[in-house]
Image (cartoon, rainbow, N blue to C red):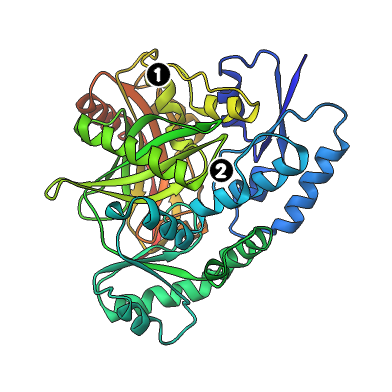
Amino acid sequence: MTKNVFVIGLNDLNAERLRRLRGVEDVEFHPLLTPAQVSETQDFDIPAMLKEAEETLDAFDGSIDAIVGYIDFPVSTMLPILCEKYGTPQASLESLLKCEHKYWSRVVMREAIPDHIPKFTAFDPFDDEALAKIGQADLRFPFFVKPIKSSGSRLGFRIDSPEDFDFAIEKLRAEIRSIGEPFDHVLSRANLPEDIAAVEGHYCMAEQVIGGRQCTVEGYVHNGEVVPYGTVDSIRYPQVLSFFYYLYPSQQLPQKVQDKMWEITRTIMAHIGYDNAGFNIEYYWDEVQDKIWLLEINTRIAQSHCDLFEMVDGVSHQQVTIDLGLGRKPDMPKGEGPDNVAAEFFYRVFFRDATVARAPSRAEVEVAAEQIDGTRIASYVKKGQLLSELPEQDAYSFAVASVWMGARTQGKLLYNYEQVMKRLNYEFTDIVE
Protein backbone atom coordinates (compact mmCIF):
# COMPACT_ATOMS: atom_id res chain seq x y z
CA MET A 1 0.00 0.00 0.00
CA THR A 2 1.31 3.45 -0.93
CA LYS A 3 2.39 5.67 1.98
CA ASN A 4 1.75 9.39 1.61
CA VAL A 5 4.42 11.71 3.01
CA PHE A 6 3.77 15.46 3.06
CA VAL A 7 6.91 17.60 2.94
CA ILE A 8 6.66 21.24 4.03
CA GLY A 9 8.44 23.53 1.56
CA LEU A 10 9.47 20.70 -0.79
CA ASN A 11 11.70 21.94 -3.62
CA ASP A 12 13.12 20.20 -6.70
CA LEU A 13 16.55 19.57 -5.17
CA ASN A 14 15.17 17.81 -2.11
CA ALA A 15 12.55 15.95 -4.15
CA GLU A 16 15.46 14.35 -6.04
CA ARG A 17 17.23 13.50 -2.78
CA LEU A 18 14.11 11.89 -1.37
CA ARG A 19 13.63 9.66 -4.40
CA ARG A 20 17.14 8.23 -3.88
CA LEU A 21 16.51 7.09 -0.29
CA ARG A 22 16.20 3.50 0.88
CA GLY A 23 12.79 1.93 1.34
CA VAL A 24 10.77 4.61 -0.48
CA GLU A 25 9.56 2.47 -3.36
CA ASP A 26 6.04 2.54 -1.90
CA VAL A 27 6.20 6.19 -0.76
CA GLU A 28 4.61 9.11 -2.58
CA PHE A 29 5.92 12.56 -1.62
CA HIS A 30 3.53 15.51 -1.62
CA PRO A 31 4.48 19.21 -1.29
CA LEU A 32 2.85 21.09 1.58
CA LEU A 33 3.23 24.89 1.31
CA THR A 34 5.79 26.28 -1.14
CA PRO A 35 9.49 27.09 -0.71
CA ALA A 36 8.59 30.74 -1.36
CA GLN A 37 6.29 30.73 1.68
CA VAL A 38 8.62 29.07 4.17
CA SER A 39 12.23 29.67 3.13
CA GLU A 40 12.54 32.30 0.41
CA THR A 41 11.22 35.13 2.56
CA GLN A 42 11.69 36.64 6.00
CA ASP A 43 7.98 37.36 6.55
CA PHE A 44 6.11 34.47 8.15
CA ASP A 45 2.36 34.52 8.74
CA ILE A 46 2.24 31.31 10.76
CA PRO A 47 -1.54 31.27 11.43
CA ALA A 48 -2.20 31.67 7.69
CA MET A 49 0.35 29.01 6.78
CA LEU A 50 -1.07 26.55 9.31
CA LYS A 51 -4.57 27.21 7.98
CA GLU A 52 -3.49 26.62 4.38
CA ALA A 53 -1.59 23.45 5.32
CA GLU A 54 -4.59 22.09 7.23
CA GLU A 55 -6.91 22.83 4.31
CA THR A 56 -4.59 20.91 1.97
CA LEU A 57 -4.37 17.95 4.34
CA ASP A 58 -8.12 17.92 5.04
CA ALA A 59 -8.86 17.89 1.30
CA PHE A 60 -6.48 14.99 0.60
CA ASP A 61 -8.30 11.82 -0.43
CA GLY A 62 -5.99 9.23 1.09
CA SER A 63 -3.97 8.33 4.17
CA ILE A 64 -1.71 10.92 5.78
CA ASP A 65 1.21 8.74 6.85
CA ALA A 66 3.85 11.38 7.65
CA ILE A 67 4.33 15.15 7.77
CA VAL A 68 7.97 16.16 7.63
CA GLY A 69 10.31 19.06 6.95
CA TYR A 70 14.02 19.83 6.69
CA ILE A 71 13.94 23.62 7.20
CA ASP A 72 14.48 25.69 10.34
CA PHE A 73 11.94 28.22 11.60
CA PRO A 74 9.07 28.47 10.80
CA VAL A 75 8.81 24.91 9.41
CA SER A 76 10.40 23.25 12.45
CA THR A 77 7.91 24.88 14.82
CA MET A 78 4.86 24.14 12.65
CA LEU A 79 5.63 20.43 12.39
CA PRO A 80 4.68 19.39 15.95
CA ILE A 81 1.43 21.36 15.69
CA LEU A 82 0.43 19.66 12.42
CA CYS A 83 1.70 16.21 13.41
CA GLU A 84 -0.26 16.27 16.66
CA LYS A 85 -3.46 17.18 14.81
CA TYR A 86 -3.07 14.46 12.16
CA GLY A 87 -1.60 11.77 14.41
CA THR A 88 1.82 11.33 12.79
CA PRO A 89 5.12 10.87 14.70
CA GLN A 90 7.03 13.97 15.77
CA ALA A 91 8.60 15.50 18.88
CA SER A 92 6.21 17.37 21.17
CA LEU A 93 5.96 21.14 20.82
CA GLU A 94 7.29 21.69 24.35
CA SER A 95 10.35 19.46 23.85
CA LEU A 96 11.05 21.16 20.53
CA LEU A 97 10.85 24.61 22.13
CA LYS A 98 13.29 23.52 24.84
CA CYS A 99 15.75 23.33 21.94
CA GLU A 100 14.64 26.26 19.76
CA HIS A 101 13.83 28.91 22.39
CA LYS A 102 17.45 29.84 23.04
CA TYR A 103 16.87 31.08 26.59
CA TRP A 104 14.76 28.07 27.63
CA SER A 105 17.31 25.82 25.97
CA ARG A 106 20.15 27.29 28.06
CA VAL A 107 18.09 26.96 31.24
CA VAL A 108 17.49 23.27 30.50
CA MET A 109 21.14 22.73 29.60
CA ARG A 110 22.19 24.29 32.92
CA GLU A 111 20.19 21.56 34.66
CA ALA A 112 21.85 18.65 32.83
CA ILE A 113 25.24 19.71 31.42
CA PRO A 114 26.30 22.87 33.32
CA ASP A 115 30.02 22.41 32.59
CA HIS A 116 29.48 22.73 28.84
CA ILE A 117 27.56 26.02 28.51
CA PRO A 118 28.62 29.69 28.72
CA LYS A 119 27.27 32.41 31.00
CA PHE A 120 24.06 33.80 29.51
CA THR A 121 21.13 36.12 30.06
CA ALA A 122 18.04 37.25 28.13
CA PHE A 123 17.32 40.92 27.39
CA ASP A 124 14.76 43.09 25.64
CA PRO A 125 16.44 44.95 22.74
CA PHE A 126 13.86 47.75 23.11
CA ASP A 127 14.98 48.37 26.72
CA ASP A 128 17.31 51.37 26.83
CA GLU A 129 18.93 49.89 29.95
CA ALA A 130 19.66 46.55 28.27
CA LEU A 131 23.46 46.93 28.26
CA ALA A 132 23.56 47.79 31.96
CA LYS A 133 21.36 44.79 32.78
CA ILE A 134 23.64 42.50 30.77
CA GLY A 135 26.53 43.75 32.89
CA GLN A 136 24.56 43.01 36.05
CA ALA A 137 24.31 39.40 34.85
CA ASP A 138 28.13 39.20 35.08
CA LEU A 139 28.70 39.39 31.34
CA ARG A 140 31.57 41.63 30.21
CA PHE A 141 32.96 42.54 26.80
CA PRO A 142 33.34 40.66 24.57
CA PHE A 143 30.06 38.76 24.33
CA PHE A 144 27.64 37.62 21.63
CA VAL A 145 24.06 38.75 21.12
CA LYS A 146 21.40 36.95 19.06
CA PRO A 147 17.60 36.59 18.98
CA ILE A 148 16.05 33.94 21.22
CA LYS A 149 14.74 32.53 17.93
CA SER A 150 16.56 32.84 14.67
CA SER A 151 17.77 30.68 11.81
CA GLY A 152 21.29 30.40 10.51
CA SER A 153 23.39 33.25 11.86
CA ARG A 154 20.83 35.96 11.12
CA LEU A 155 21.03 38.93 13.52
CA GLY A 156 23.93 37.45 15.47
CA PHE A 157 26.69 39.87 16.53
CA ARG A 158 29.95 39.83 18.47
CA ILE A 159 30.02 42.75 20.89
CA ASP A 160 33.43 44.19 21.84
CA SER A 161 32.36 47.70 22.87
CA PRO A 162 29.33 49.90 23.63
CA GLU A 163 29.50 51.09 20.02
CA ASP A 164 29.20 47.49 18.77
CA PHE A 165 26.19 47.02 21.04
CA ASP A 166 24.54 50.20 19.70
CA PHE A 167 25.07 48.98 16.11
CA ALA A 168 23.57 45.57 16.94
CA ILE A 169 20.61 47.09 18.77
CA GLU A 170 19.81 49.28 15.76
CA LYS A 171 19.74 46.22 13.50
CA LEU A 172 17.80 44.13 16.02
CA ARG A 173 15.13 46.77 16.58
CA ALA A 174 14.67 47.18 12.83
CA GLU A 175 14.29 43.49 12.02
CA ILE A 176 13.58 41.35 15.07
CA ARG A 177 9.79 41.68 15.08
CA SER A 178 9.69 39.78 11.77
CA ILE A 179 10.96 36.81 13.79
CA GLY A 180 9.49 37.63 17.18
CA GLU A 181 5.85 38.02 16.25
CA PRO A 182 5.48 34.68 14.42
CA PHE A 183 7.48 32.97 17.18
CA ASP A 184 5.11 34.45 19.76
CA HIS A 185 2.26 32.69 17.96
CA VAL A 186 4.04 29.35 18.34
CA LEU A 187 4.80 30.07 22.00
CA SER A 188 1.11 30.78 22.61
CA ARG A 189 0.33 27.18 21.56
CA ALA A 190 2.67 25.66 24.19
CA ASN A 191 2.56 25.12 27.95
CA LEU A 192 5.43 27.30 29.18
CA PRO A 193 6.84 27.79 32.68
CA GLU A 194 6.17 31.31 34.02
CA ASP A 195 9.78 32.43 33.82
CA ILE A 196 10.05 31.26 30.20
CA ALA A 197 6.71 32.79 29.15
CA ALA A 198 8.05 36.17 30.33
CA VAL A 199 10.81 36.00 27.69
CA GLU A 200 8.81 36.94 24.59
CA GLY A 201 9.56 36.25 20.94
CA HIS A 202 11.33 39.56 20.31
CA TYR A 203 13.80 39.06 23.19
CA CYS A 204 17.50 38.42 22.67
CA MET A 205 20.29 36.49 24.33
CA ALA A 206 23.67 37.73 25.51
CA GLU A 207 26.26 35.01 25.98
CA GLN A 208 29.87 34.70 27.05
CA VAL A 209 32.21 34.31 24.08
CA ILE A 210 33.10 30.68 23.47
CA GLY A 211 35.18 29.27 20.69
CA GLY A 212 37.55 26.66 19.36
CA ARG A 213 37.17 24.09 16.63
CA GLN A 214 33.51 24.08 15.62
CA CYS A 215 31.51 21.08 14.54
CA THR A 216 27.98 19.70 14.31
CA VAL A 217 26.81 16.36 15.66
CA GLU A 218 23.90 14.95 13.63
CA GLY A 219 21.52 12.61 15.44
CA TYR A 220 17.97 11.41 16.03
CA VAL A 221 15.80 10.01 18.80
CA HIS A 222 13.65 6.96 18.12
CA ASN A 223 11.32 5.67 20.84
CA GLY A 224 13.49 7.26 23.52
CA GLU A 225 16.85 6.06 22.16
CA VAL A 226 19.23 8.94 21.34
CA VAL A 227 21.42 8.02 18.34
CA PRO A 228 24.24 10.33 17.13
CA TYR A 229 25.40 9.17 13.69
CA GLY A 230 27.92 11.69 12.35
CA THR A 231 30.20 14.63 13.19
CA VAL A 232 30.68 17.40 10.62
CA ASP A 233 33.45 20.03 10.87
CA SER A 234 32.35 23.68 10.47
CA ILE A 235 35.37 25.57 9.15
CA ARG A 236 35.37 29.38 8.99
CA TYR A 237 37.19 31.85 6.79
CA PRO A 238 40.37 33.11 8.51
CA GLN A 239 39.81 35.95 10.98
CA VAL A 240 36.03 36.21 10.37
CA LEU A 241 32.88 34.57 11.71
CA SER A 242 31.52 33.36 8.35
CA PHE A 243 31.65 29.68 7.40
CA PHE A 244 33.99 28.63 4.55
CA TYR A 245 32.97 24.96 4.36
CA TYR A 246 31.39 22.00 6.12
CA LEU A 247 33.47 18.80 6.09
CA TYR A 248 32.30 15.24 6.74
CA PRO A 249 33.45 13.13 8.47
CA SER A 250 35.30 15.32 10.99
CA GLN A 251 39.00 15.68 10.26
CA GLN A 252 39.88 18.23 12.95
CA LEU A 253 38.60 16.57 16.15
CA PRO A 254 40.32 13.68 18.00
CA GLN A 255 38.11 10.61 18.35
CA LYS A 256 37.97 10.97 22.15
CA VAL A 257 36.56 14.49 21.76
CA GLN A 258 33.93 13.27 19.30
CA ASP A 259 33.02 10.43 21.68
CA LYS A 260 32.56 12.93 24.53
CA MET A 261 30.36 15.15 22.35
CA TRP A 262 28.18 12.14 21.54
CA GLU A 263 27.92 11.37 25.26
CA ILE A 264 26.84 14.96 26.01
CA THR A 265 24.37 14.71 23.13
CA ARG A 266 22.73 11.62 24.60
CA THR A 267 22.53 13.27 28.04
CA ILE A 268 20.91 16.54 26.97
CA MET A 269 18.45 15.13 24.43
CA ALA A 270 17.24 12.52 26.93
CA HIS A 271 16.89 15.23 29.61
CA ILE A 272 14.81 17.38 27.26
CA GLY A 273 12.48 14.49 26.41
CA TYR A 274 12.81 15.07 22.67
CA ASP A 275 11.64 11.98 20.78
CA ASN A 276 10.91 10.55 17.32
CA ALA A 277 12.62 13.31 15.35
CA GLY A 278 16.02 14.26 13.97
CA PHE A 279 18.23 17.02 15.34
CA ASN A 280 21.74 18.39 15.24
CA ILE A 281 23.87 20.04 17.92
CA GLU A 282 26.61 22.59 17.28
CA TYR A 283 29.69 22.32 19.48
CA TYR A 284 33.08 23.95 20.02
CA TRP A 285 36.19 22.16 21.23
CA ASP A 286 38.62 24.57 22.93
CA GLU A 287 41.85 22.70 22.26
CA VAL A 288 43.93 24.80 24.67
CA GLN A 289 41.66 24.14 27.66
CA ASP A 290 40.48 20.77 26.35
CA LYS A 291 36.92 21.98 26.96
CA ILE A 292 33.75 21.20 25.03
CA TRP A 293 31.11 23.92 24.68
CA LEU A 294 27.56 23.31 23.44
CA LEU A 295 26.53 26.18 21.17
CA GLU A 296 22.94 25.31 20.22
CA ILE A 297 20.47 22.57 19.32
CA ASN A 298 18.64 22.54 15.98
CA THR A 299 15.47 20.48 15.65
CA ARG A 300 15.98 19.10 12.14
CA ILE A 301 18.70 17.54 10.03
CA ALA A 302 21.04 20.01 8.32
CA GLN A 303 20.18 20.38 4.64
CA SER A 304 23.76 21.44 3.96
CA HIS A 305 24.97 18.03 5.10
CA CYS A 306 22.63 15.89 2.96
CA ASP A 307 24.94 15.48 -0.01
CA LEU A 308 27.96 15.00 2.27
CA PHE A 309 26.37 11.94 3.87
CA GLU A 310 25.35 10.64 0.46
CA MET A 311 28.88 11.01 -0.93
CA VAL A 312 30.54 9.32 2.06
CA ASP A 313 27.91 6.95 3.49
CA GLY A 314 25.82 6.22 0.42
CA VAL A 315 22.55 7.95 1.31
CA SER A 316 21.43 11.45 2.27
CA HIS A 317 20.45 11.76 5.90
CA GLN A 318 17.02 12.74 4.70
CA GLN A 319 16.72 9.01 5.38
CA VAL A 320 16.41 9.95 9.06
CA THR A 321 13.63 12.47 8.40
CA ILE A 322 11.50 10.10 6.32
CA ASP A 323 12.00 6.95 8.40
CA LEU A 324 11.15 8.75 11.64
CA GLY A 325 8.18 10.47 10.01
CA LEU A 326 6.84 7.02 9.12
CA GLY A 327 7.51 5.67 12.60
CA ARG A 328 10.48 3.54 11.51
CA LYS A 329 13.98 3.28 12.97
CA PRO A 330 16.27 5.11 10.52
CA ASP A 331 18.22 2.92 8.09
CA MET A 332 21.43 4.98 7.87
CA PRO A 333 24.43 3.17 6.32
CA LYS A 334 28.08 3.95 7.07
CA GLY A 335 30.94 4.31 4.59
CA GLU A 336 29.03 3.00 1.58
CA GLY A 337 29.51 6.09 -0.61
CA PRO A 338 32.16 6.70 -3.30
CA ASP A 339 34.24 9.26 -1.32
CA ASN A 340 36.27 9.30 1.90
CA VAL A 341 35.44 12.95 2.67
CA ALA A 342 32.94 15.48 1.34
CA ALA A 343 32.29 19.20 1.78
CA GLU A 344 29.94 22.05 1.09
CA PHE A 345 31.92 25.20 0.27
CA PHE A 346 30.41 28.69 0.57
CA TYR A 347 31.61 31.28 -1.92
CA ARG A 348 31.18 34.57 -0.05
CA VAL A 349 31.66 38.28 -0.55
CA PHE A 350 32.46 40.43 2.47
CA PHE A 351 30.52 43.60 1.69
CA ARG A 352 27.80 45.27 3.74
CA ASP A 353 25.80 45.37 0.51
CA ALA A 354 26.29 45.53 -3.24
CA THR A 355 24.49 45.05 -6.52
CA VAL A 356 25.23 41.97 -8.62
CA ALA A 357 26.66 43.26 -11.91
CA ARG A 358 27.32 39.79 -13.29
CA ALA A 359 26.44 36.25 -12.23
CA PRO A 360 27.42 33.05 -14.09
CA SER A 361 24.81 31.66 -16.45
CA ARG A 362 23.25 28.25 -15.95
CA ALA A 363 25.51 26.89 -18.70
CA GLU A 364 28.60 28.34 -17.02
CA VAL A 365 27.60 26.76 -13.71
CA GLU A 366 27.12 23.38 -15.41
CA VAL A 367 30.53 23.62 -17.14
CA ALA A 368 32.20 24.50 -13.82
CA ALA A 369 30.56 21.53 -12.09
CA GLU A 370 31.77 19.19 -14.84
CA GLN A 371 35.41 19.89 -13.91
CA ILE A 372 35.19 17.42 -11.01
CA ASP A 373 33.00 14.31 -11.06
CA GLY A 374 30.08 14.45 -8.62
CA THR A 375 30.26 18.21 -8.06
CA ARG A 376 27.05 20.18 -7.63
CA ILE A 377 26.85 23.99 -7.63
CA ALA A 378 24.02 26.26 -6.52
CA SER A 379 24.25 29.94 -7.46
CA TYR A 380 21.98 32.15 -5.35
CA VAL A 381 22.10 35.52 -7.14
CA LYS A 382 21.22 37.05 -10.49
CA LYS A 383 22.24 40.22 -12.30
CA GLY A 384 20.75 43.38 -10.80
CA GLN A 385 19.98 41.81 -7.42
CA LEU A 386 20.93 43.48 -4.15
CA LEU A 387 22.89 41.18 -1.87
CA SER A 388 20.79 42.40 1.05
CA GLU A 389 17.78 40.74 -0.61
CA LEU A 390 19.28 37.29 0.08
CA PRO A 391 17.47 35.55 2.96
CA GLU A 392 19.17 33.88 5.96
CA GLN A 393 22.59 35.56 5.78
CA ASP A 394 24.99 36.20 8.63
CA ALA A 395 25.91 39.72 9.76
CA TYR A 396 29.34 39.77 8.13
CA SER A 397 29.09 38.41 4.57
CA PHE A 398 26.82 37.14 1.79
CA ALA A 399 26.95 33.58 0.45
CA VAL A 400 26.44 33.89 -3.30
CA ALA A 401 27.05 30.23 -4.19
CA SER A 402 27.51 26.79 -2.67
CA VAL A 403 29.65 23.97 -4.04
CA TRP A 404 29.24 20.34 -2.93
CA MET A 405 31.96 17.82 -3.75
CA GLY A 406 33.70 14.69 -2.48
CA ALA A 407 37.30 13.42 -2.66
CA ARG A 408 39.80 11.03 -1.12
CA THR A 409 41.37 13.64 1.18
CA GLN A 410 40.67 17.10 2.61
CA GLY A 411 43.64 18.53 0.69
CA LYS A 412 42.29 17.21 -2.61
CA LEU A 413 38.89 18.74 -1.80
CA LEU A 414 40.42 22.19 -1.34
CA TYR A 415 42.41 21.89 -4.57
CA ASN A 416 39.33 20.77 -6.52
CA TYR A 417 37.27 23.65 -5.11
CA GLU A 418 39.82 26.18 -6.36
CA GLN A 419 39.72 24.63 -9.84
CA VAL A 420 35.92 24.82 -9.96
CA MET A 421 35.73 28.42 -8.76
CA LYS A 422 38.14 29.56 -11.47
CA ARG A 423 35.30 28.82 -13.91
CA LEU A 424 32.77 31.08 -12.18
CA ASN A 425 32.75 34.84 -12.55
CA TYR A 426 30.79 37.16 -10.24
CA GLU A 427 31.03 40.94 -10.44
CA PHE A 428 29.53 43.60 -8.14
CA THR A 429 28.84 47.34 -8.25
CA ASP A 430 27.64 49.94 -5.74
CA ILE A 431 29.70 48.19 -3.09
CA VAL A 432 29.14 49.29 0.51
CA GLU A 433 32.29 48.46 2.50
Question: In this rendering, does residue 295 appear at all?
Answer: yes
Asked if residue 198 is positioned above or below residue 307 in the image, the reply reads below
Residue 372, quarter of picture: top left
The foreground one among 153 and 36 is 153
Q: Is residue 342 left or right of residue 307?
A: left
Q: Residue furthest bottom?
A: 128
Residue depicted at 76% across the width and 17% down the height: 2
Image coordinates of residue 382 in percent, x first then y, are 51, 47
Residue under numbered circle 1: 313
Asked if residue 152 is positioned above or below residue 347 in the image, the reply reads below
Residue under numbered circle 2: 71
Element under label 2?
loop
Image coordinates of residue 21 in percent, x first then y, are 56, 18
**Count the marks: how many?**
2
Residue depicted at 85% across the width and 39% down the height: 58
Mark 1 crowd level (few <14, some 14–19, many ≥20, 10 Å Cα): many
**Mark 2 or 1, nearer chain start:** 2
Residue depicted at 42% across the width and 33% down the height: 305
Amino acid on which the number 2 mark rests in the picture = Ile
Element under label 1?
helix
Amino acid on which the number 1 mark rests in the picture = Asp
Question: In this rendering, does residue 390 appear at all?
Answer: no
The foreground one among 216 and 309 is 216
The foreground one among 116 and 40 is 116
Q: Quadrant of the N terminus?
A: top right
Q: Is residue 403 left or right of residue 51?
A: left
Image coordinates of residue 135 in percent, x first then y, are 30, 79
Give the label on residue 198, or none. none
Image coordinates of residue 214 in percent, x first then y, are 28, 45
Marks 2 and 1 sit apart, C-alpha to C-alpha, by: 22 Å
Residue 197, quarter of picture: bottom right
